[in-house]
Image: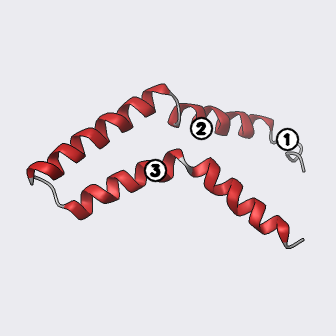
């Protein structure tokens, strides 16, 4: 199943956005965010629930491709 006709610029823009959001800069920002949130959780300056939400959000952001692939493979088994 390919992309529909005329969707070339849209697909290119989405791929650029994906590359930007999951690139090196985003990875560095996520590592710094997790480290700082983890340190703040250990020192008691931040709620553990909020800290866990930030860490879970980073896992979901960077694991989104694997999550979608798993859902698609599970859905295609029924056909």
Q: How far, Cα to Cα, is label 1 from label 2?
A: 20 Å
Eye-nearest disc, 1 or 2: 2
**At which x and y percent is residue 74?**
75, 66
Residue at image mark 3: 59
Q: Residue at x 23, y 46 (%)?
A: 37
Disc 2: CA contacts within 10 A as few (<14), some (14-19) or many (>=20): few
Q: How far, Cα to Cα, is label 1 from label 3?
A: 33 Å
Residue at image mark 2: 18
Is 29 displayed left or right of 24 in the figure? left
**At which x and y percent is residue 17?**
58, 36
Q: Which quadrant of the view contains residue 46?
A: bottom left
Mark earlier in primary sequence (1, 2): 1
Q: Secondary structure at mark 3?
A: helix
The mark found on residue 68 in the picture is: none
Eye-nearest disc, 2 or 3: 3
Q: How far, Cα to Cα, is label 2 from label 3?
A: 15 Å
Q: Residue furthest bottom?
A: 78
Mark earlier in primary sequence (1, 3): 1
The mark found on residue 6 in the picture is: 1
């Amino acid at each position: 199943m390919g992309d529909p006709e005329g969707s070339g610029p849209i697909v290119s823009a989405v791929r650029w956005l994906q590359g930007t959001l999951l690139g090196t800069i985003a990875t560095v920002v996520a590592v710094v965010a997790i480290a700082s949130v983890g340190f703040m959780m250990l020192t008691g300056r931040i709620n553990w629930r909020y800290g866990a939400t930030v860490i879970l959000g980073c896992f979901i952001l960077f694991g989104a491709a694997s999550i979608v692939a798993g859902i698609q493979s599970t859905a295609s088994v029924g056909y």
